[in-house]
Amino acid sequence: MTQASDRETTIIRTERGLTIAGTRLTLYDVIDFLKAQYPPKLIRDKFNLTEEQLSAALGYIKANSTQVEAEYQQVLQTREEIRQYWEDRNREHLTHIATMPHKPGQETLWAKLKEQKAKRASKAL
């Protein structure tokens, strides 16, 4: 790990992965912005990092590029699996809600909504 001083480690491993000490920011967050071609100064400002923290993160990424890239790919895979899970779950939930009958007394509101949707659909053509 990279040392900023004798008493402080700047890059630590937490349950979230490689993290900049004193923050909740992972190196994978920094890599996302690097791959999007953000300049280091903008990354520093965006995450409110000190120059030392950013230098430690960039230095660690460069020094351990193979290991960090492999972990980053795993993080991307996990993110995609989580996104897919919630997309599927929400789709099922919204489909279920759509099949539920409307509450009594709201027929006028639903008719008005249906009319507005029809108007928008006809304007789109």
Image (cartoon, grey):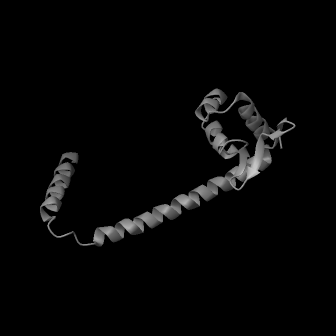
Q: Position of residue 10 (x, y in %)?
A: 77, 39
Instruction: Give the left or right position of residue 59, taking residue 107 as reference.
Output: right
Which residue occupies 62% across, 33% down?
A: 48
Q: Position of residue 99 (x, y in %)?
A: 29, 72
Say left or right for 121 vs 39: left
- Residue at 18%, 56% (x, y): give it: 113
Residue positioned most to the left: 108
Image position of 93 (left or right of 30)? left
Q: Nearer the viewer, residue 13 or 33?
A: 13
* Residue at the farthest front position: 7
Q: Depth check: 117 or 42 in front? A: 42
Q: Quadrant of the N terminus?
A: top right
| Residue 61 position in % (x across, y down) | 76, 40
Looking at the image, is 124 positioned above or below residue 74? above
Viewer-nearest residue: 124 or 84: 84
Left or right position of 39 against 92: right
